[in-house]
Image: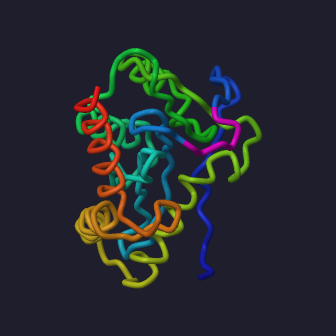
């Protein structure tokens, strides 16, 4: 669907940029090994609102999200905080957080929060959509399955409530081809069940 394009990735050349530790290989052997983050926009009668997601790559599960009326760093930080609270990752640098070069993600506050949580930052090196392809894919599904289908949107609150419902549906009911046509929550449950069974046989 065509419409006004909003530029969400605004780089900050002055900000120190982390290395690209993913190199477009969006694969993980376990949960909390690699997260990807990005945000998109939704047109409403009140103006544009912005929706940020944090995705665990292992099962494509959305582990953090936030809706905001502005693109400030606060709102992507809120999505990260939700993911950290929900997942409680180990503070041993075994989790990589990957994003594009947007100024929000390379900001001092965002970088400091990752360091404080023991999360290794990674930022795409080329500066195009392929550098954060998995997050872009989730944004695309969100737009196609919810935003375009139920437009027009009147308010930020309407987008927020619908996003809450969609994230729950996506995590628990959306069948994903890369997972063998099961939902993300089921893929994670299968992983932990196998871990438990292996531990019992040792």
- Is 123 left, or right, of 74 in this rendering? right
Q: How is the image coloured?
A: rainbow
Locate residue 34, reporting x and y percent: 49, 36
Q: Tell me: residue 72, above or below residue 44.
A: above
Q: Which image quadrant is residue 12 in?
A: top right
Write the residue at 40% across / 83% down: 151
Locate residue 195, reporting x and y percent: 31, 37
Q: Is residue 23 a member of the stretch shown in magenta? A: yes
Q: Tell me: residue 72, above or below residue 59.
A: above
Magenta residue span: 22-27
- Is 135 left, or right, of 158 in this rendering? right
Write the residue at 43% across / 57% down: 50
Q: Tell me: residue 71, above or below residue 4.
A: above
Name the residue furthest front: 201
Q: Which image quadrant is residue 172 in?
A: bottom left
Foreground of the two, 169 or 198: 198
Foreground of the two, 25 or 38: 25
Foreground of the two, 24 or 194: 194
Q: In the rendered image, which quarter contains the N terminus?
A: bottom right
Q: Main secondary structure of the magenta part?
A: loop
Locate residue 51, reporting x and y percent: 41, 56
Write the residue at 57% across / 44% down: 27
């Amino acid at each position: 669907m065509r419409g006004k394009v909003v530029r969400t990735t605004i780089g900050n050349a002055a900000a120190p940029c982390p290395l690209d530790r993913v190199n477009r290989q969006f694969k993980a052997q376990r949960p909390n090994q690699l997260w990807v983050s990005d945000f998109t926009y939704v047109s409403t009668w009140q103006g544009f609102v912005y929706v940020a997601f944090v995705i665990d790559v292992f099962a494509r599960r959305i582990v953090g999200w936030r809706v905001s009326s502005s693109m400030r760093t606060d709102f992507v930080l809120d999505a990260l905080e939700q993911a950290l609270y929900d997942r409680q990752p180990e503070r041993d640098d075994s989790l990589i957080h990957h994003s594009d070069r947007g100024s929000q993600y390379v900001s001092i506050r965002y970088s400091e929060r990752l360091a404080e949580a023991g999360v290794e930052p990674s930022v795409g090196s080329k500066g195009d959509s392929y550098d954060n392809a998995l997050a872009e894919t989730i944004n695309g599904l969100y737009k196609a399955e919810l935003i375009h289908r139920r437009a027009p949107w009147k308010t930020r609150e309407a987008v927020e409530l619908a996003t809450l419902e969609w994230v729950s549906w996506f995590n628990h009911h959306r069948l994903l081809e890369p997972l063998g046509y099961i939902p993300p929550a089921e893929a994670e449950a299968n992983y932990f069940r196998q871990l438990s069974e292996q531990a019992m046989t040792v």
